[in-house]
Amino acid sequence: MLEPSSLSLHPRVSTVLWGCSWSNRPKKIIGQLTPLLDILGEIDVKDLIEKLKPVLDAIAQIDVKNVVEKLLPLIDTLTQIDLSTLVQKIIPVINALTEVDITQLVKKLVPIIHALAILIYKVDIVGLFNTAKPLLDDLAGVDLTGIVDALKPVLDALKKIDVQGIVDKLLP
């Protein structure tokens, strides 16, 4: 390595090559290290080691070989994923999501979620399912399609009734 003391250079050349004159270089280095040493001097190393010891003990108990053996199948599976196709399929979803006004959506969902939370808190869900189970078991054997098909003509006939006209005639 080139040592400044082995060369007889003009002070300006020395400043350009080494950033300062050689006689000032140690002072400059010490001046730069002083704030760092001050900060390091404030660290309570014993306390730091005491705080790190439980973390280091926990890390020492990790069976790295076992963790790696469990991760290898996952990594093998991940390497088989066609990321290009996955990204191409996700891009339209992301583009569609950019058009959603999340703020308005959240404003509309918060009251619903709040109401559901209150309802779930007040309702004995297990009891509700236990009460509903016999009914659901009975409905499992019912031909709902047949019932709906049978009700369609009745519903069509109800649509033709002028309910507003009847109400207008009944009210003075």
Image (cartoon, rainbow, N blue to C red):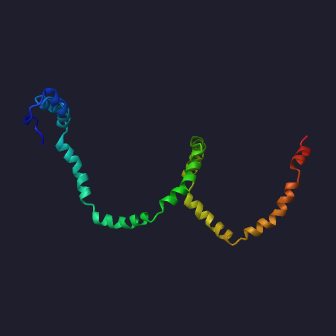
- In x, y percent, where is residue 156? 84, 59
Question: What residue is shown at x 19% (from left), y 30% (from top)?
Answer: 16
Q: Nearer the viewer, residue 65 or 156?
A: 65
Residue 67 location, quadrant: bottom left
Question: What residue is shown at x 66% (from left), y 66% (from top)?
Answer: 135
Q: Residue furthest bottom?
A: 141
Question: Quick check: can you spot residue 39?
Answer: yes
Question: Quick check: can you spot residue 63?
Answer: no
- In x, y percent, where is residue 170? 90, 45
Q: Nearer the viewer, residue 14 or 90?
A: 14
Q: Nearer the viewer, residue 72 or 114?
A: 72
- In x, y percent, where is residue 74? 40, 65
Q: Nearer the viewer, residue 167 or 161?
A: 161
Question: Could you tell me which quadrant the C terminus lies in?
Answer: top right
Residue 39 location, quadrant: top left
Question: Could you tell me which quadrant the N terminus lies in?
Answer: top left
Q: Residue furthest left?
A: 6
Q: Total of numbered circles in the picture? A: 0
Describe residue 39's horizontal placement relative to residue 137 as left or right.
Answer: left
- In x, y percent, where is residue 22? 12, 31
Describe residue 121's horizontal placement relative to residue 26 as left or right.
Answer: right
